[in-house]
Image (cartoon, rainbow, N blue to C red):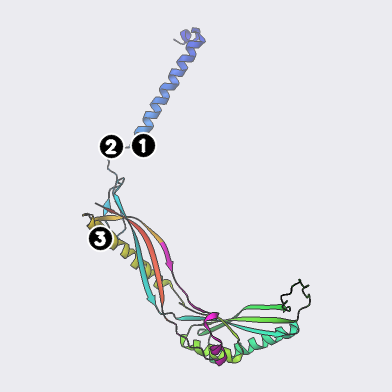
Amino acid sequence: MLKLYRRAAWQLQLLTIIVIVAALAVIGFLGLQQFQAGDPGEQPPASKTVDIGGAAAILPAGERPFGLHVLGEGEVVVTPDRSIVELGVEASASTAAAAAEQASTTAERLVAAVREISSNPEEIQIQTTGISLAPVFPQVQAQPQPQPKSANPVGYRSSNTITITIDKLDLTSSVLDAALAAGANTVHSISFTLKSDGPAKERALRLAVLDAANKARVAAEALQGSVRGLISLNEEYVHVPVARSTRSAFPEAVMSSGSVPVEAGQLRIRATVRANFAYE
């Protein structure tokens, strides 16, 4: 047989090789298909969904159920337990050194006045968050003909920014009164927030998820169906606001009198989720 094959023309030898290679490729492909298919008698296991508001059910793997896309919202109202006061001290003088010295002296007097209210770091924390020094140039009056600007400053302005974090809210008004009396001439802002917002955010998120589950149930009942389980759930956002009063909210009369009424109010923490529930 081998001798006959060797005596055959080279075209016949090439054709024989091609046929053998093609047969081996077909056999390998069929074997791979059978391996991937597995045992036809085995059933794929069922996959479980997460129980959200009592809507959980077992969905067979591979099934594509109809989906109800809903938006869940949750809100938690809390009382802030921390205030943050940002104060400014500004001073002007003919020289840079004099302006800086005046601002620094007033800032030191301000810090000492606040320390007299409470030196407990668990109640009040004081931090210098800004220092600036800049020249002041004369204002150029409008003239029919352009006038050259003066390169020489007429003075200097220095400012210090002091941020005071107050973890005992009933001290906030006293801190403001003491700071104004000590020479603070700018209240940049007063804000109210939470020392730890984790628990409130969790409660808001839970309410949002339950709201989504309830909306899905109502929608399914309107369609004369029922919720089978959760397909997907995405957290959109959880927002923790900061109640803030800016500099424009403090009139000159309050600044000069040294008496600033303070009301913390309440914070509304909101959470939003997007959910897709299966129904039938």
Please state which of residues 4 and 67 is positioned toward the viewer in this rendering.
Answer: 67
Kindly identify which residue carries mark 3: 218
> Disc 2 residue type?
Pro
Residue drawn where x is 43% and y is 22% of the image: 22
Q: Say which quarter of the image contains residue 141.
A: bottom right
* Residue 118 appears in view: no
The number of numbered badges drawn on the structure is 3
Q: Residue furthest left?
A: 224
| Segment tinted magenta in the rendering | 236-264
Check disc 3 and give the amino acid type. Val
The first of marks 1 and 3 along the sequence is 1
Q: Mark 2 points at which residue?
A: 40
Q: Does the magenta stretch include residue 255?
A: yes
Verify whether residue 70 appears in magenta.
Answer: no
Looking at the image, the residue that sits furthest to the front is 144
Per the image, label 2 sits on a secondary structure element best described as loop
Residue tagged by mark 1? 36
In the displayed structure, 38 sits above or below 54; it is above
Q: What residue is shown at x 29% (from left), y 44% (from top)? A: 44
Q: How far apart are marks 1 and 3 (CA)?
A: 43 Å
Residue drawn at (48%, 83%) of the image: 167
